[in-house]
Image (cartoon, rainbow, N blue to C red):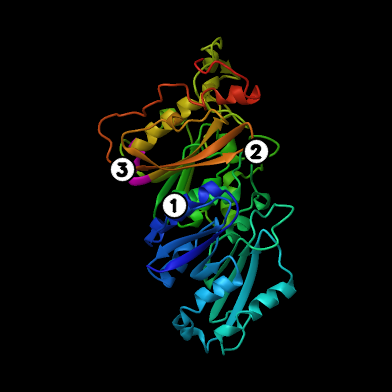
Amino acid sequence: MPLFLVYFAHFHQEFRLPELDSLSILENVPITYDASSYSPESPFFLIEVESAAQAAKLVRRGILIRFIIEYWGSGKTYDELFTLLKQTPDRWSDFMACSFKFTVDGFGRSLSQKEKVSVIESFSFMGFQGPIKMKNPDAEFFVCEEYGEPDNPLPAETPKMIWFGRLLGQGSRDLIDKFDVKKRKYLGNTTMDAELSLVMANQALARDSALVYDPFVGTGSFLLTCSHFGAYSMGSDIDGRQIRGTAGFRLGVNGISANLAQYGLADRVLDTVVFDICRNPWRDGPMFDAIVTDPPYGVRAGAKRLGRKSGVDPERSLRVVDGVENHRRSDYLPPTEPYEMSDVISDLLSFAAEKLVVGGRLVYWLPTVAGEYDPKDLPVHPVLRVVANSEQPFGGWSRRLVTMEKIASLEGRATAELPEHAPAHKNFRDRYFSKFEALSLNS
């Protein structure tokens, strides 16, 4: 199959290939590539796709992809590149008379306009005769000089690689600006940033007619991004104040509904409801195509479940206040107790194994202590297969975006299988606020 060059955005490098694989499934475009050739230091990656039309289709909703280019050649010098290009002059014949333009870019070094013009003129041997058209040309040729990491204060004087080809399409990075949390009418201190929220929607295979659920919906970021891609979504939370927008001074007064109206997605979000996911009211059996969530792990808001802390009067909710039993008042909040992170993840996997359809995906964030994480920390389940596990570091800790796929129907009441050792996310909240000092992980 022909080769195509993916030009990734230079962000979230561990997330790029998992998203690319998800796009292949979403767009029904088979791809092949050599994973060992991928480098997080480079935004360029060669893949095989059946045709140029399929390649353009592949990336159209990509968030971590800038462009896809029909690969014509590469070299460490222009002489090396030109020697390679001159071996396939038949490739140029279809573009001799059409309108065209050249785009010249630099990765790791900014090129002056004079340098760009010089590069364009050096391709004159190709002999294109059509008119130059800067907007909507019939063909756009792409040249990029790769110098290395863009934050290097002393970039190399010569490129480490020069890439050339025909530009075919681009991703949807404009959506990052559209869903920028700074532009939303309603947000909270746990609202997920737009870029990663959109990546998660792709990882979840959110698409037309899919049903996506967030069991820790908070301020509803994933409802927006998944529904933007055509899915029907719904969410729940133990704290209805987050949903309604009455949970604190940083939140708005119209809740999630304000954002749905802002983005015109009210007809795609079926509902948001209030209950404890540990005591959920859903019917038995599979119903969701994807579960996408960011469980509260205690950095900004701790996880809670229904219950009473030790020492709390169990009769408190039954007291009569102003002639009304306390638990029947409209402003009554049921008692809750802390929900330990490892228990949250274990219960989440068991829930997903039952409620996902076969082929459905669970996409969730897992916090972990840097330096202590082991792949065996992840609880597993007989009917869930790990598809991707990507890290976002924050210094002393990191969070991992874990994607799992349901591969078989659930037999009986099989639950998540926990690691024999204490995982690096055990007691995460306590360890975070103690600056990751050694604590008893078995408490």
Crowding at mark 1 (Cα within 10 Å: few <14, some 14-19, many 20+): few
Left or right for 299, reference 14: right
Which image quarter: residue 432?
Answer: top right
**What's the amino acid at mark 1?**
Ala
User: Is 373 or 177 nearer to us in this picture?
Assistant: 373
What is the number of the mark on residue 189?
A: 2
Left or right for 249, reference 140: right
Task: Give the foreground label among 3 and 2.
Answer: 3
Q: Residue at the location (52% across, 18% down)? A: 441
Q: Which residue is mark 3?
A: 407
Pick whichever of labels 2 and 1 is earlier in the sequence: 1
**Quadrant where the N terminus is found in the figure:** bottom left
At which x and y percent is residue 201?
48, 50
Residues at marks 1 and 3 touching, judged by CB atoms closer than 8 Å: no
Q: Residue at the location (62% across, 85% down)? A: 132
Q: Is residue 326 above or below residue 387?
A: above
Q: Is residue 69 above or below residue 281?
A: below
At which x and y percent is residue 408?
28, 41
Q: Which residues are magenta?
A: 354-360
Q: CA distance from mark 3 to mark 2?
A: 35 Å
**What's the amino acid at mark 3?**
Ile
Q: How many labels were placed on the picture?
A: 3
Residue 112 in magenta stretch? no
Q: Is residue 177 above or below residue 125?
A: above
Q: Secondary structure at mark 2?
A: loop
Q: Which residue is mark 1?
A: 35
Left or right for 67, reference 405: right
What is the number of the mark on residue 60?
A: none
Q: Secondary structure at mark 3?
A: loop
Residue 231 in view (yes/no): no
Task: Give the foreground label among 2 and 1.
Answer: 1
